[in-house]
């Protein structure tokens, strides 16, 4: 049985999904890629916006979520922390 993802892992997965789509993503695509319920995704989106890791924009009359510089920085630093902890088997 798989372990549940931590809050940090979910945040990283969501930010990486946005990054993989060129730095911006539509809500429906993020819902599928983040593997969360609609309600949980919305609560995480509010959290990410409050922490200024993403911004909500409108592009061609469609809502999109876009990574901020702080969001890109989070992804890079999270990757370093994971590599460090994996090196020590933590």
Image (cartoon, rainbow, N blue to C red):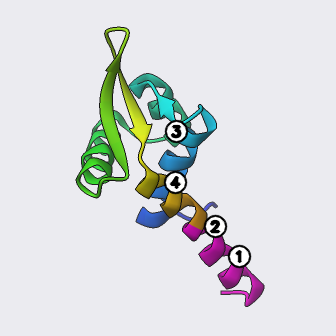
Nearer the N terminus, badge 3 or badge 4?
A: 3
Nearer the N terminus, badge 4 or badge 2?
A: 4
Residue 80 as seen in the image, left or right of residue 51:
right
Circle 1 residue: 83
**Residue 52 image position (x, y, % from top left):** 30, 53
Q: CA distance from mark 4 to mark 1?
A: 17 Å
Q: Which residues are magenta?
A: 77-90
Residue at position x 28%, y 48% from top? 49
- Location of residue 11 with respect to 40 vertically, above or below: below
Circle 4 residue: 72
Pointer 1 with pointer 3, Cβ within 8 A = no
**Residue 2 image position (x, y, % from top left):** 62, 60
Q: Residues within 10 Å of mark 3 (few under 14, many from 20)?
A: many
Pointer 4 with pointer 2, Cβ within 8 A = no
Q: Under tag 1, what secondary structure?
A: helix
Circle 2 residue: 79
Pointer 1 with pointer 2, Cβ within 8 A = yes
| Among the 4 quarters of the image, the one containing residue 81 | bottom right
**Residue 62 image position (x, y, % from top left):** 35, 14
Q: CA distance from mark 1 to mark 2?
A: 6 Å
Q: Residue furthest right?
A: 87
Q: Is residue 5 visible?
A: no
The circle on residue 31 is none
Residue at position x 38%, y 26% from top? 64
- In the image, is residue 30 part of the stretch drawn in magenta? no
């Amino acid at each position: 049985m798989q372990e549940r993802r931590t809050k940090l892992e979910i945040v990283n997965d969501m930010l990486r999904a946005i990054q993989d789509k060129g730095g911006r993503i539509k809500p429906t695509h993020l819902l599928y890629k983040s593997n969360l319920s609609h309600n949980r995704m919305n609560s995480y989106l509010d959290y990410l916006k409050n922490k200024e890791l993403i911004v909500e924009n409108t592009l061609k009359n469609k809502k999109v979520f876009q990574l901020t510089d702080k969001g890109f920085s989070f992804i890079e630093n999270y990757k370093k922390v994971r590599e460090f902890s994996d090196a020590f088997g933590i």
